[in-house]
Every structure is written in C-alpha cells, then in structure tokens.
Amino acid sequence: MSEQDANKERLELALEAAGLDLWENDLVTGEVICKTSKVFTELGYGEEESLSFMDDVFKIVHPEDIPLIKTAINNHLRGIATQYRCEFRVLSKSGAWVWYANYGKIMDRDENNSGRRFIGVTFNIDDRKRNEEMLAVRGQVWRTLVENSPDTIARYDRECRRIYVNLALSTLT
C-alpha cells in the first residue's frame, strides 16, 4: 500500500470514528465533488432518494433554517466569517426533524480572492440539541418555582454580594 493510499484510509477511518461526513464543492464549475452520503443514510433515505436531494438539499431542510444556512454561506463567501458554520434541521424519511451541523471553508482562492473549492464536514448534533432543549425547559421550571416560592431565596456571589432575591424575599425586605 502506498503512503497516499494509507493516508486516504487513515482520513476515512478518522472521519468515520468522529461521525463526520465529508463534502466538497467546486465553486468554479458548480459541481459537487464529494457528496454527503452518510447523512442521507442516517436519515433513512435510499441511494436514489439521496441523489435527488443532492440537486436541491433545501427540499428537506427545515424552512426556518434555510435563511440561516444561506446567510452563513454568504458571510463566509464575502470574507465576513473565516469559516462556514451552521446548525440546522433536516427531515428524516420517518418525518422527524434531525439536527445537523456543517463546518466548512473555502480553499484554493485565486488572485481575485475568489474561492475555487468549498470543503467541509456535516455531522449529527441531534442529541446535543435535544439535551439543550431539555436543560432550557428545566431551567425555566426551576426559575418559575423559585420566583413563586413562598420561602425567601437569595443568591450571593463569592464576595458575599447579593445577586438575586426572589419575590418573597423582595416583598419581605
């Protein structure tokens, strides 16, 4: 096995181990060089369905997230952001919305600073997003309980300065 083949195998194994799906677009020709096949498999789509989404991936992206993706890409293309980073929901074949992230960068810029290649990875962040939602709900429940508690509750910082009091303590003092 040549060193180049060994490096290619290492890269493929590292991407698989990290749960990353590599993609690459030729910005000059508009051609998709490397397609995100793993994502579509995770979402339950077959090979033929996956290929149809390559032409218009926005067909299965949550409508609220499309402007976020387009803004993130445009910000990177214009040099406002040094990397393209975006989190969005994609419709699975079962009808559930699944969270993914895209991280990428324009490479091989020409003398006019126009990019020739756009390369990056897509990965599943659904568990993280679900946990964030759960923590936000729990946090709101906690705040409601503390605010409406008949007991007096105060919070102090390290210098013993009061930084929070609930309504019961505020009313009492």
Image (cartoon, helix red, strand yellow):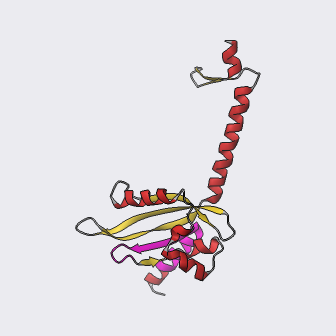
The answer to whether residue 18 is magenta is yes
Residue 152 shown left or right of residue 10 in the figure? right
**Side of 164 relative to 105 (left or right):** right
Rendered position, 117 above or below 6? above
Q: Residue placed farthest to the right in the image?
A: 150
For the point 62% across and 54% down, the residue is: 129
Q: Nearer the viewer, residue 152 or 67?
A: 67
Stretch in magenta: 7-30
85, 49: nearer the viewer = 49
Closest to the observer: 66 or 22? 66
> Farthest residue in the bottom direction?
1
Q: Quadrant of residue 14?
A: bottom right
Residue at (66%, 53%) from the top-left corner? 130
Total of numbered circles in the picture? 0
Residue at (47%, 83%) from the top-left corner?
5
Q: Is residue 136 above or below residue 39?
A: above
Picture quarter with the C terminus: top right
Residue 52 appears at what percent x and percent y?
A: 54, 78
* Quadrant assignment, res 136: top right
Q: Is residue 136 magenta?
A: no
Q: Which residue shows up at 37% across the image and 66% down it? A: 106
Q: Residue 146: which quarter of the image?
A: top right
Q: Position of residue 154 (x, y in %)?
A: 67, 22
